[in-house]
Image (cartoon, rainbow, N blue to C red):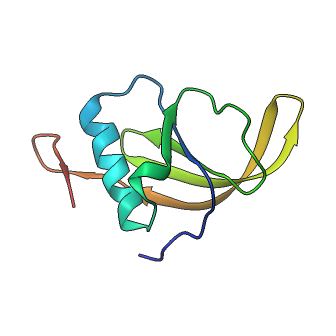
Amino acid sequence: MEKIEYTGTVYVLDHKYPEPLLNHSIKKLGDLGIKKEDITITDSPESPQIGNIVVEVFPYHLDIARVRTIRNDSFISGSITTVELKTDADGKYID
């Protein structure tokens, strides 16, 4: 897996997903070179800057994007990559 180049905060968007999913997502981001201390888990980023990484968490994958434009209080991001989250037969996250 290639490392993601970034500076500043990495926003992980949490829509009240279970803790095992968030923990596995953070582990997968670490595999991509993102430091745990740079990650902020939020439902909506406060003051994102152009170039920040935004990660949308889904039960079976992560959509990783970079903020391209900011308008008013909203941001537009462009996709960098999608990371598959694998589970075993019991639904526990693996890899």
Q: Is residue 56 left or right of residue 66?
A: left
Q: Is residue 53 left or right of residue 70?
A: left
Quarter where residue 7 is shown: bottom right
Q: Is residue 68 left or right of residue 52?
A: right
The answer to which of 15 and 12 lies nearer the viewer is 12
Outermost residue to the top: 16
Rendered view: 55 above or below 41: below
Q: Where residue 31 sits in the image (x, y, percent)?
A: 36, 66
Quarter where residue 72 is shown: top right
Rendered view: 81 above or below 63: below
Residue at 29% of width from left, 47% of height from top? 24
Q: Where residue 55 sits in the image (x, y, percent)?
A: 54, 47
Residue at 14% of width from left, 50% of height from top? 88
Rendered view: 43 above or below 60: above
The answer to which of 90 and 69 lies nearer the viewer is 69
* Placement of the C terminus among the 4 image quadrants: bottom left
* Placement of the N terminus among the 4 image quadrants: bottom left
Q: Is residue 33 left or right of residue 54?
A: left
The answer to which of 54 and 37 lies nearer the viewer is 37
Q: Where residue 83 sits in the image (x, y, percent)?
A: 44, 59
Residue at 73% of width from left, 57% of height from top? 51
Quarter where residue 90 is shown: top left
